Amino acid sequence: MKMAHAYCQPRSKVAGLFFAALALSCVAAAQTVTKVMTIPTYPKHSIQGMVITADGYLVQCHDQGYCRIYDFKAKNPEPLADFRLGSSGTGNHANAASLSSTYYKGNKDFPLLYVTGGVASGPMVCHVENIVKDGSSYSARQVQAITLADEFRWDMAPASHYKTDDGFYKIWGFPSWLVDNEEKCLYVFSAIYRTTLPYARHKEQNRYVATKMRLPDVSEGDVVLTRADVLDQILYDFDVFITQSGCIKDSKIFYTFGFGKPRESLKSSQMRVFDIKQRKIVQSLDLAEAIPEELEACSFYKGDLYVMTVKGNVYKIGL
């Protein structure tokens, strides 16, 4: 297992001032931002993780594990299906969704869907869902639950340590689970400290942490991943607050941030592109003015990047 030690040194005072300025003014704005579709919201169940399949279906997860499917090719705002995930419940925020390239036995319509479950202070769990189409009806069943062992989490208390003696970095919790279909692995994406503004005083010590894990086969049943399952760990500079969710393409993690507030609030809409091979941020997109709404998810379709907002608006992002 490789560790990225280069990013763990404290910044100087001068570097700290630069970091503060960078948080207020991102490197570049997206070339073009175009609204392409608006889907209806779901009363009492906010929009959360989203994916677009290769054949043009938009799978939208909602808080507590509710799910709708749309014809994205036709940009039809009327849902084709409305159902609950097998893992639905009050403890499933469905914060992120990630499609694998693997189909469950007998299923030729939808590949396995990896849904980030739990809540901020709860178990670090991923629900693997098999979505089944039967005629015009759809349903889902959880076929696996993947949980991170407690050894990955630290309590952010002053006397605690997030770095172990052998160079492993613990996270505060509530990671996004992202499938890397090219590498056939899972990435658990989080940070050392929580990324909300009450923890801004730790910004100089904070880092985003991408932990590469083996991808369990569904035949294994429910799995608890331990440090023995870690393949790599990368630390990225921390320069933006409020994690949402993301996706992986071409060895890059595309990730959304913010609550859609004005830029000076440090809660504006932002995107970062984390290069896995180069082990650094390679693109920073300032969407504060183009999308003054809370970003919830992003996904690629036919080579183009799309983001979903909490209001149900889908935007195409030029890179």
Image (cartoon, helix red, strand yellow):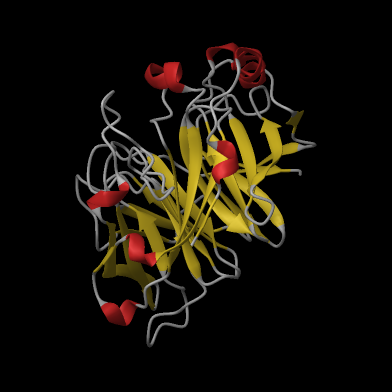
Residue at image point 49% right, 23% down: 203
Residue 271, x across and y down, in percent: 62, 36
The image shows residue 50, relative to residue 310, as above or below, that is below
Disc tally is 0
Residue at image point 78% right, 37% down: 32
Residue 199, x across and y down, in percent: 39, 21
> Residue 136 versus residue 122: which sits nearer the camera?
122
Q: Residue furthest left?
A: 90
Q: Can residue 30 be seen?
A: yes
Residue 64, x across and y down, in percent: 26, 47
Residue at image point 34% right, 37% down: 172
> Residue 269 versus residue 184: which sits nearer the camera?
184
The image shows residue 180, relative to residue 205, as above or below, that is below
> Residue 164 versus residue 102: which sits nearer the camera?
164
The image shows residue 28, relative to residue 49, as above or below, that is above
Question: In the picture, residue 319 is in which quadrant?
Answer: top right
Residue 41, x across and y down, in percent: 41, 39
Residue at image point 55% right, 65% down: 53
